[in-house]
Amino acid sequence: MSIFSEFREFIARGNVIDLAVGVIIGGAFGKIVTSLVEGVIMPPIGLLTSGVDFSRLSWVLKADDPATTASELVAIQYGAFLNTLIQFLIVAWVIFVMVKAVNALRRAEVAAAPPPAPTAEETLLGEIRDLLKSGR
């Protein structure tokens, strides 16, 4: 078996295609959630914190010297980390709510599904049982 035919079999498997679709949808969903966080959720949080922009918070270790071009600002950007952490928590919450909703829909579908009809064997066995009970 050549390497190309093995590769074709690998790509043709359903779980590889499912993974590819999941990655593409995940990337698009990530953009939607990023837009939600940055454009809708973070502005009210900034308003509640008196306009503090988390992404600009930093701990300066060495200030830059405007007199020389060789001296640069050295700072720990903890605000960017806080911003990313808040975004992660929001994304995790949205995914949790979506999974919970999908699971509820699946449970509702299972509960609403009628019981399966008895097979021919089950029907025949039921008739035999009834005949034995009646004494014929």
Image: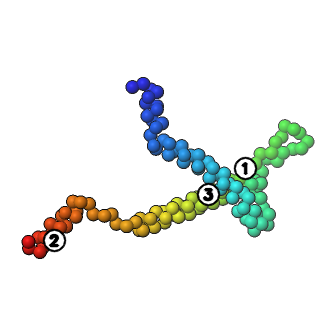
Q: Tell me the CA gap for discs 3 and 1.
A: 25 Å
- Is residue 82 visible in the rendered image? The answer is no
Q: Residue furthest right?
A: 67
Q: Which residue is mark 3?
A: 91
Q: Residue furthest front?
A: 136
Quadrant where the C terminus lies?
Answer: bottom left
Nearer-the-camera pick, 131 or 96: 131
Q: Tell me the CA gap for discs 2 and 1.
A: 82 Å
Check disc 3: other Cα within 10 Å, few if <14, some if 14-19, many if 20+: some
Q: Which residue is mark 1?
A: 76
- Helix, strand, or loop for circle 2? helix
- Disc 1 residue type (three-letter): Ile
Q: Earlier in the sequence, mark 2 or mark 3?
A: 3
Q: Is residue 51 left or right of residue 33?
A: right
Q: Tell me the CA gap for discs 2 and 3.
A: 59 Å
Residue shown at 62%/53% (left/top)? Answer: 29
Residue 93 x/y as whole percent: 59, 61
Relative height, residue 14 to residue 102 (above, below): above
Residue shown at 18%/64% (left/top)? Answer: 125
Residue 68 x/y as whole percent: 89, 39
- Disc 3 residue type (three-letter): Val
* Mark seen at residue 130: 2
Mark 2 vs mark 3: give the one in front. 2
Residue shown at 48%/63% (left/top)? Answer: 103
- Helix, strand, or loop for circle 3? helix
Q: Residue furthest left?
A: 136
Nearer-the-camera pick, 114 or 68: 114
